[in-house]
Amino acid sequence: MLHTPPTRRALLAAAFGSATLLMLGCSEKVEPFSGIDITGADYATAFSLTDHNGQPRTLADFKGKVVVVFFGFTQCPDVCPTSMSELAEAKRLLGPDGERLQGLFISVDPERDTPEIMKQYMASFDPSFLALYAAPDALPALAKSYKVYYKKVDGPTPTSYTMDHSAGSYVYDPQGRIRLYHRYGTGPAALAGDLKRLLAEG
């Protein structure tokens, strides 16, 4: 029978313990985000638009904040107001961290969504949220770069048309990197949880 000196036994035990801890650490699963993780995507990476106050805006303006971008139009009867209300509620659920959230609404209806109308619309959800405007001739390229679908649907009169459009939000981390896509109806609690995690990453 081999005899192992006490000192060597202690060293072997310590090494085994460390290896066990490392194995346990590797086996710990990180909880997935509630939204779809699109980290590293080659789309929805940037924009250069004008806000409802007439100020030019890019993602770099909001460094240090998590940014949530939604495409819609102010005369939308259901999806848009629901999404913006949920975003405002997510901000409330974040508590003090809510100051580090920037909500952005990009209009797919530049014909009717004037800066004045969009400013009033944002104020009805949260005064810190900004609506962004793309010129009609620039909107198609922007929507394509975000993989956003939109289409004008004629109504009974020339001005009573509606807009079909994608329903979902893009989420950026405080470094301005695209990270998540939240489908419509995910809910404010799930969104707030994901935003809190991104803020905690630094």
Image (cartoon, helix red, strand yellow):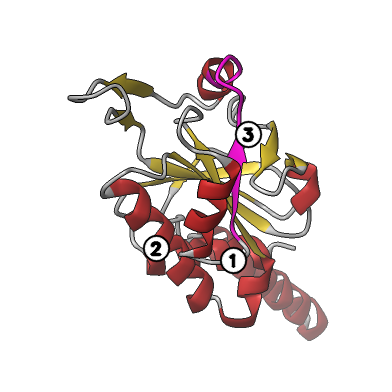
- Name the N-terminal-most of marks 3 and 2: 3
The quadrant in which the N terminus is found is bottom right
The percent coordinates of residue 199 (x first, y second) are: 66, 65
Residue at (41, 40) in percent of width and height: 73
Residues shaded magenta: 129-139
- Across the whole image, how many numbered discs are drawn on residues? 3
The alpha-carbon separation of the residues under discs 2 and 1 comes to 12 Å
Q: Is residue 172 visible?
A: yes
The alpha-carbon separation of the residues under discs 3 and 2 comes to 28 Å
Residue nearest the viewer, comparing 63 with 34: 63
The residue that label 1 is drawn on is: 127
- Name the N-terminal-most of marks 3 and 1: 3
The answer to if 135 sits in the magenta stretch is yes
Q: Secondary structure at mark 3?
A: loop
Q: Is residue 193 visible?
A: no
As drawn, 59 above or below 13: above
The answer to if 131 sits in the magenta stretch is yes
* Mark 3 vs mark 2: in front: 2
Q: Residues within 10 Å of mark 1 (few under 14, many from 20)?
A: few
- Name the N-terminal-most of marks 2 and 1: 2
- At label 2, which amino acid type do we have? Ser
The alpha-carbon separation of the residues under discs 3 and 1 comes to 31 Å
Residue 40's disc number: 3
Residue nearest the viewer, comparing 70 with 33: 70
Drawn side of residue 139 relative to residue 188, left or right: right
The residue that label 2 is drawn on is: 85
Residue at (53, 27) in percent of width and height: 146
Q: Secondary structure at mark 2?
A: helix
The percent coordinates of residue 70 (x first, y second) are: 48, 44
Looking at the image, which residue sits at the far bottom?
6
